[in-house]
Image: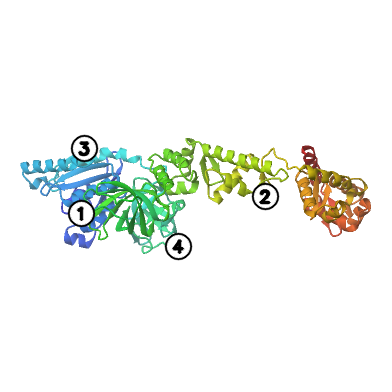
Amino acid sequence: MIVGVAGHVDHGKSALVRALTGVDTDRLKEEKARGISIDLGFAYMSGDNGDIIGFVDAPGHHRFIRNMIAGAAGIDVLMLVIAADDGVMPQTREHLAIASLLGVKRVIVAFTKIDLVPNDWREAMLAEVREFLGETKFSDAPVFPLSNRTGEGIDSLRKELVGMTPAAKSRAPEKRFRLTVDRCFTISGAGTIVTGPVMSGSVSVGDFVTVSPAGLSARIRAIHAQNRPVETGLCGERCALNLTGDGITREAIARGDVILDPVLHAPADRIDCRLNLLASEARPLKHWTPLRVYHAATEVSARAALLQDEPVTPGAESRIQLVLEKPIAAAAGDPFVIRDTSGMRTMGGGRFIDLRAPQRRRRTAGRIEQLCAMEVQNNADRLRALLKAKPYYINRMEFVRDHALSERAFRDLLKDTPHMSVGSDMVISKKTWRTLYENAHGALKAFHEKYPEKSGAPAACLVAGFEPRFPKEVSLKVIDALVQAGFVIAQGGVFRLPEHESRLDSKDEISWARMLPHFKGEGRFRPPRVPEWAELLHINESVIRRILKTKSRQGVVTEIITDHFFLRETINEVATILDELGRAAPDGSFSAAQLRDRLANGRKLSIQLLEYFDRQGVTLRRGDMRRIDRLRLERVVENASVEARSV
């Protein structure tokens, strides 16, 4: 469990941590000289059951609030320190407000310095503290009067903390690994060390990780979790990671960087979020207001782009878009805090909704519908809501990445969601899939009725009929999925229904009847080419070509070279002759001249036929001689027979 220690300056935070753990968290020379905490301090305490409780001692001075926010990242419990001789002070209020904005669920109050005030003053200050808590959502937070100097009340506080430890072990283990860096330093003989809370998932020695947003690759050499060496660091623990890799140095990694599973590396610089503007703000938040954004341990300048016409009034909640000065490593649902540009005043905070927010059309009805779906709390419910909202599909990898989910966790979500996977990276609902199938079936049926002679429709015809409308690349994936499912047949770059067969109109059928005798009989091995057909029948070449192409798609004729068609049964006969030539030869080989003599059709045409069979793999050429691949021959003849029967 990780406990964040916060409160007003000089209320005894560091002294309290020292009383609980025996560790002085003021490690900097300036901290010891000035007697106040400037940066984060860390200490650990063992519980009775062997669990380790980590303490993050945050600075109380208003100038170091950014360090306090960094310390609040990943904590399980906020221990708010209030001195009996001072009572509730400005940073007391601000620290508790920040904890609330960051989603901290549990708060305990350490009421320190009770040895410095008389009993009646103590009771008055206790009443003030409870009144203050009553104004917040932490009204039931326990209050522990104590003295760091005399030790009074310390044991009761320690017992309370130990009792809270088991409840802190259920944080996001199903997600991918993320650790937010709050310190980076080097140790002689070990190298670069980063420390911080594990926000989600787990990591083990030997794992490869990425330093984001820089994108540096690293390997985990060693891990300390809760101040002891381990093989695996878990969600909810404070870990120190010994990193190694090209470019991994103390100077290359800064506070606010995130060490994460390489799959999650996709920095964001335009984020839609839900904002709660504090009621203490004097003015509404207007469009394009400059501010400072604090996420985990990072701090970045930004502008607030409103997603509504009116400014956000103090005390209100609203969606805004944060346009960041530089990208950060984040996940959907992460909490954040905003402060004014001077960093002196906390303005509000909330949670990230969409890390890939659009720059344009961000207020449209469709976009608002999508954001509403993204704000659904439960992951499974959110997935179902997204599939019902525009654009009616999700990219699998983007959803997994932006929510820091493991593959197993995503598969579990899909089990409870009626869906169809389209390709390897797209998911749609079953309802949308049925609609798309009906769209495709209707579009193809209409096309076949209008153009019965054509074998199928181009992809554009199907895409134009899809409702909902998808981007072109997504629509093409849908068509591929329809083909894979057998609902649509892809043939020659066009698409048709399984039951469709291209057919000639009555006029073309008459022309085909005139052509058919010339394909048979003694001239079957030397049929006319398209120009010769046109001259013979006094029909335009384009008409002849259309007729023969249609018959080719039906499997009646075969085009061996451009504009030269043979009956399919004649091709089968030639194949049989080739087999006979091969069997008659001692070595199984034969020449083009031998085929020419059997067919009596001339050397050029015989060679064209042999080259056709070469392309089919039926004949294997060696110089001027060829051999038969009988297995391939049987398959070609069998397929031709099936096609002929189907026609």
Q: Quadrant of the C terminus?
A: top right
Look at the numbered disc 1 and give the secondary structure of its residue: loop
Give the CA distance from mark 3 to mark 1. 24 Å
Q: Are marks 3 and 2 in contact (CB under 8 Å)?
A: no
Q: Which mark is residue 493?
A: 2
Q: Position of residue 453 (x, y in %)?
A: 73, 44
In the picture, measured across the screen, residue 433 lies left or right of residue 128, that is: right
Report the disc number at residue 60: 1
Judging from the image, the colouring scheme is: rainbow
Does any portion of residue 218 appear in the rendered image?
yes
Query: Dots 3 and 4: beta carbons under 8 Å?
Result: no
Residue 387 disc label = none
Q: Quadrant of the N terminus?
A: top left
The x and y percentages for residue 346 are: 24, 53
| First-in-chain label (3 vs 1) | 1
Please give the label number shown on residue 140: 3
- In primary-sequence order, the first of circles 4 and 1 is 1
Tell me the amino acid under the disc marked 1: Gly
Asked if the residues shown at circle 3 and circle 1 are in contact, with their CB atoms under 8 angstroms apart, the answer is no
